[in-house]
Amino acid sequence: MRQDSFILKGNICYSKTIGHLSTTDHGYLICHNGISRGVYPVLPEKYQNLPIIDYHDMLIIPGMTDLHIHAPQYPFRGLGMDLELLDWLNTHTFPEESRYTDLEYAIKAYKLFTDNLKKSASTRAVVFGTIHTPATSFLMEQLNTTGLKTYVGKVNMDVNCPDNLREKDAQTALDNTDEWLQKNIGKYQNTSPIITPRFAPVCSESLLEGLGKLLKKYQLPVQSHLSENLSEIEWVKKLFPWSSCYGDVYDHYELFGTVSKTVMAHCVYSTDEETELLKENGVYIAHCPQSNINLSSGIAPIRSYLDAGIPVGLGTDMAGGANLSMFRCMADAVGVSKLYWRLVDQEKKPLTIEEVFYLATKGGGSFFGNTGSFEDGYEMDALILDDSGICSTRTLTTKERLERYIYLADEGGKLAGKYTAGTEILLSE
């Protein structure tokens, strides 16, 4: 249902800066032509003719951005969580992704994924597909119908991977990607392509060089993985002995923020040199705490990245992460930061609720532009949270209710409404 201009009334929470949570009880959130015009405790006279949707005592927060997620892995979520990354890829991921050469299977799987992403708390997402162009094109088509704003990548890999997931050679991969881009750039209102080398070890230098040229040709964003696992990093050193660090491989082929926005998932073991390269190029980090736990990767030093001024958002990395819950992602981000502080570096303070809320909303949302906040001029993405089913004998502030919802969403929380860029997402469809 399209409603470009309206008012949401309820208990409103959003971030302007990373360390502060702004709350307005029984406030008014103004949406005009899909854009937020701010939050007010009293309705301004100039907006009094707009329709009001009264959510009474419910919480209203900005939509959240899942900055890193693998759509084809949805069918085996929750499996293989006792394996490390490379074993998990070979045991579960690659066999599943090879099935997407069968378009009929891909249609079935992607309909399931997109339906559940629509019903999740994410209003925006940066999504990996597979190497298969028909399946990835269908994924884009399906995501567009959800009303969510997404980037989708056709994966590129031509070496060091199973035969049934290896494109014939670098030129074939580049030709397939170029054809896919030409067919899908500008085709959809809600979904756009993103350049996607899976990760450096499965891409030849010819393929990386060619993707850099496609990037400059089409001026698209980039997504990939970086410094997730110690074995992976050693593998990169052997494959690219000329590189000074893992990130230098991407940077060498201009796939590291110098041409357009780039997001790298994980960055668990980025060296000082790599961290400086991330900072200089404005590369986004998608912090995926649940995945890093499940695949025994480690703990990303997010406090260090924030102190360095590197843009950071959160990702479920499903199916490395076992579900689509951005609430679980926030809770895990706090938890692993405490372990990092206690076990690794006591100079790095744990993340706070205010900080992880910012990362899930405005921090990751900025990859899409002015999204993830209710400040004036931001695209109006919003979630309506009904916490009446989360029982307590205590009277809580709005901030405390939000914190409780982050941890107890599955105990009795309900997503009662969802809006993306001023469009209501009908959750029951």
Image: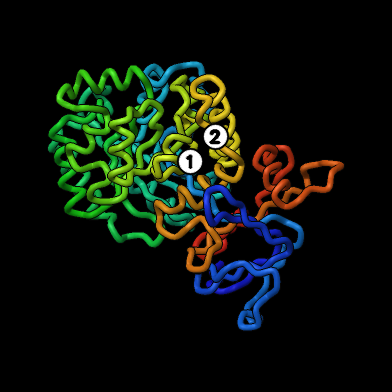
* For marks 2 and 1 on the same chain, the one whose residue lies earlier in the sequence: 1
Q: Position of residue 2 (x, y in %)?
A: 54, 69
- Is residue 134 visible in this depiction of the protein? no
Marks 2,1: beta carbons within 8 A = yes
- The residue positioned 39% from the left and 16% from the top of the image is 87
In the rendered image, which residue does mark 1 sit on?
314
Label 2 sits on a secondary structure element that is helix
In the rendered image, which residue does mark 2 sit on?
333
229 vs 345, nearest the viewer: 345
Q: Position of residue 244 (x, y in %)?
A: 21, 27
Colour scheme of the picture: rainbow
Label 1 sits on a secondary structure element that is strand
- The residue positioned 23% from the left and 54% from the top of the image is 219
Which image quarter: residue 281?
top left
Which image quarter: residue 12?
bottom right
Q: Residues within 10 Å of mark 1 (few under 14, many from 20)?
A: many
Q: Residue furthest front?
A: 347
Kind of residue at badge 1: Leu
259 relative to 101, above or below: below
Say whether residue 119 is left or right of residue 378.
right
366 vs 421, nearest the viewer: 366
- The residue positioned 47% from the left and 49% from the top of the image is 363
- For the residues labelled 2 and 1, the Cα–Cα distance comes to 8 Å
181 relative to 172, above or below: below
Kind of residue at badge 2: Ala
Q: Residues within 10 Å of mark 2 (few under 14, many from 20)?
A: many
Quarter of the image where the N terminus is located: bottom right
